[in-house]
Image (cartoon, rainbow, N blue to C red):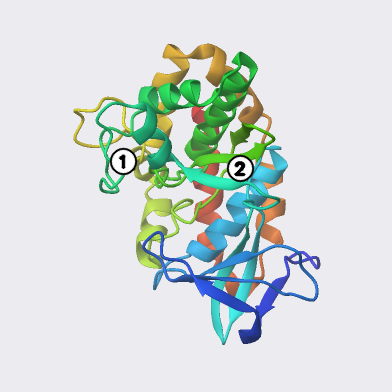
Amino acid sequence: MSESLYPVVEVQPEWVLEPEAMGSKEKFWYRARVTQDCDWLFKYPKECTGQHWAEKVAAEIASELHIRHAPVDLAVFQNRRGSVTESFARDGRNLFHGNQILAGFVLGFDPAGSFRHSSHTLENIRTALEKSFAYEHGRERAKLAMAEYLVFDALIANVDRHHENWGLLRKKVDAEWQGFLAPTFDHASSLGREILEDRREMLLRENRVGQYVEKGKGGVFWQADDRRGPSPLELIRRAIVKHPDEFRPAVEKITRFDRGMLESILQHVPEDWMSPLEREFTLALVCYSHHEF
């Protein structure tokens, strides 16, 4: 185990600002007023899952790949473990979530729809991004960035890219709005974080990690009448055929990631935060996904 471990933030009760209502997980906003000039979101993992370490490992992978993402640290609050994510909605910018954007530009889209929202298709996302920007360079930049996020999801098997897990940051300057696609965030539902140790060991022993990855139900649908979204990997297989100019650059970036980079990231996670089987499974999962590109 590396001597240089990721730090664990000790969140103090006096830092707490307010709870966060969006989403299903228990969480709250805080600010370490003496040392920070921005807010952070503390999230508790669901019981018997590794959502906290999944958030951290995913963020470190994104950093290695130079994909814009929300910074994440491991953290403890009142003896309970979790993760903390830095807010990027600051300096006068407001975050508009995907469901709000889609409701404004896609006819009939219900922003209050359920998690498995079948109208949350790749084509509807692209349409909403195209209509959100007045200039061609803004539209193309947003679509290329979204392609990176979706390819990143495929690498880490993130099945939670639902319509509130992406958005635009917008700020009014003089008389016009300026904006861009927000950094990728909320990767707790990735890297096999929910699997119990006995099943994890079985999947590794029987060489069925790839089967687990391929069965994942993603949050982005292919067609609005589909009953389920394809796995994040299958979504990219289809997307790169239909929109090669957007997705090939992202896939090329992902292929530069290698096993050694991931091993280094995992070595920096404290031993008591991630079991040996969790590390082995994470390595096998990402290597499988990476090979599929």
Could you say which is closer to the camera, residue 200 or residue 61? 61
Q: Position of residue 215 (x, y in %)?
A: 31, 41
Decide if residue 94 is in sight here: yes
Three-letter residue code for mark 2 = Pro
Mark toward the start of the polypeptide (1 vs 2): 2
- Say whether residue 69 is left or right of residue 128: right
**Residue 92: image x %, image y %?**
67, 49
The residue located at (65%, 57%) in the rendering is 266
Front position in the image: 133 or 243: 133
What secondary structure is marked by label 1?
loop
Q: How many numbered discs?
A: 2
Question: Which of the 4 image quadrants contains residue 275?
Answer: bottom right
The correct choice, above or below, for 228 with respect to 197 in the image is above
Image depth: mark 1 or mark 2 in front: 2
Left or right relative to 59: residue 101: left
Q: Quadrant of the N terminus?
A: bottom right
Label 2: element kind: loop
Residue with the mark numbered 2: 183
The location of residue 102, given as percent across then percent down, is 38, 33
Tell me if mark 1 has few (under 14), some (14-19) or many (20+) residues whose alpha carbon lies within 10 angstroms of its own: few
Residue matched to label 1: 215
